[in-house]
Image (spheres, rainbow, N blue to C red):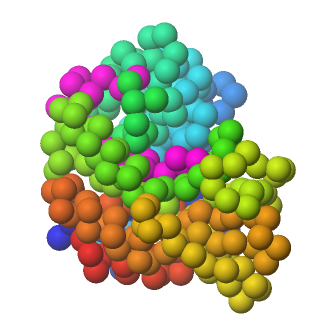
């Protein structure tokens, strides 16, 4: 059975550990152990309960450390101190491994420190799963010493989404199919075997205040980051669903025609999961599980 991993954010109160649909996944990565101002890591909410329930359901629980914009905190924290904190959280709560989510090691000395961190974690947690979240292109991927990390990590989760967003000069698809293809090719080209790669699948979409893709937005979209469960309700409110035949992903057009939302549905998720299988990957993962009504995970499983 291939891996289907889901990131579980600890800040979504509507889905406590008791309500998590464990049966959908093989692995759950608990996001996040966050850095405090003094470098101390904060354990995710309900860590022990999540690990206990996951293990009871025969699901592998992992601890994600860092997250978005965590690069400066990672760089500042002494490696020995950071490793000691991570090991303590893992052992106290029952995690089966660690996901290094360093976004991104782009400062001087950061690539080397990431390698040292991974090597130290492997030394102190020899039986644990050790993974890392990585970008889908050379833009930030160039900061990862792929050759040095390969023997240390069990697999990496490729973030094949956020291809376009509120930071972009022009509107575009959040996770076009071609980006998935190029992301896989990029990491294979860096020397990583397919069986050590997971393809990222978004359970959210990106909105843009434009009438067509490739335009400069006219303003801020109220849907610039919206979960699939909410996006799926919009067609009942007059939004029109279309599909890009080239990129094989759906998008919505607002009733006024002045806003677009690029996202993934079961059909596009199924195609991407099939791509991962055809490419020999270890599996796929979702960011993140609280945004899925179950149909996305089902489509991934059916095509994996």
The percent coordinates of residue 287 (x first, y second) are: 49, 59
Where residue 13 appears, as percent x and y from the top left, is 67, 68
Is residue 106 shown above or below 161?
above
Residue at the spot 54% in from the left edge and 41% down from the top edge: 67
Residue sitting at the far bottom: 236
Query: Residue 69 at x, y = what percent?
Result: 61, 34
Which residue occupies the foreground of this view, 221 or 193? 221
Q: Is residue 304 above or below residue 184?
A: below
The answer to whether residue 206 of the structure is visible from this angle is yes
Residue lying at 58% horizontally and 47% vertically, measured from the top left? 164
Q: 2 left or right of 207?
A: left
Furthest residue to the top?
108
Give the mark count: 0
- x 40%, y 70%: residue: 269
Highlighted range, magenta: 143-164
Q: Is residue 93 visible?
A: no
Relative to 296, does residue 38 appear above or below in the rendering? above
Residue 106 falls inside the magenta stretch: no
Q: Quadrant of the N terminus?
A: bottom left
Asked whether 159 falls inside the magenta stretch, the response is: yes
Q: Front-most of 100 and 242?
A: 242
Residue at screen point 49% across, 21% down: 106
Q: Quadrant of the C terminus?
A: bottom left
Classify residue 35 as left or right of residue 74.
Answer: right
Can you give x and y, in whole percent of width and height, for residue 18 in the image?
52, 77
């Amino acid at each position: 059975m291939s891996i289907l991993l889901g990131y579980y954010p600890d800040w979504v109160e509507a889905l406590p550990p008791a309500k998590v649909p464990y049966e959908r996944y093989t692995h759950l990565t608990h996001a996040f152990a966050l850095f405090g101002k003094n470098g101390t890591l904060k354990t995710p909410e309900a860590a022990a309960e999540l690990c206990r329930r996951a293990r009871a359901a025969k699901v592998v629980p992992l601890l994600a450390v860092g997250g978005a914009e965590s690069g400066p905190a990672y760089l500042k924290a002494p490696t020995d101190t950071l490793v000691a904190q991570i090991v303590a959280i893992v052992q106290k709560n029952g995690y089966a491994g660690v996901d290094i989510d360093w976004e991104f090691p782009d400062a001087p000395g950061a690539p080397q420190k990431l390698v040292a961190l991974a090597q130290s974690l492997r030394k102190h947690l020899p039986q644990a799963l050790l993974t890392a979240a990585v970008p889908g292109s050379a833009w930030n991927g160039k900061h990862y010493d792929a050759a040095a990390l390969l023997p240390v990590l069990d697999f990496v989760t490729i973030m094949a989404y956020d291809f376009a967003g509120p930071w972009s000069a022009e509107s575009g698809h959040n996770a076009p199919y071609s980006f998935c293809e190029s992301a896989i090719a990029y990491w294979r080209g860096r020397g990583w075997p397919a069986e050590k790669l997971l393809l990222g699948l978004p359970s959210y979409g990106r909105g843009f205040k434009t009438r067509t893709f490739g335009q400069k937005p006219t303003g801020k979209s109220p849907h610039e980051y919206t979960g699939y469960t909410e996006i799926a309700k919009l067609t009942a409110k007059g939004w029109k669903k279309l599909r890009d035949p080239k990129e094989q992903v759906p998008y919505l057009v607002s009733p006024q025609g002045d806003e677009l939302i690029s996202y993934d549905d079961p059909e596009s998720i199924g195609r991407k999961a099939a791509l991962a299988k055809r490419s020999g990957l270890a599996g796929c993962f979702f960011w993140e599980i609280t945004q899925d009504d179950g149909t996305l995970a089902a489509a991934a499983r059916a095509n994996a």
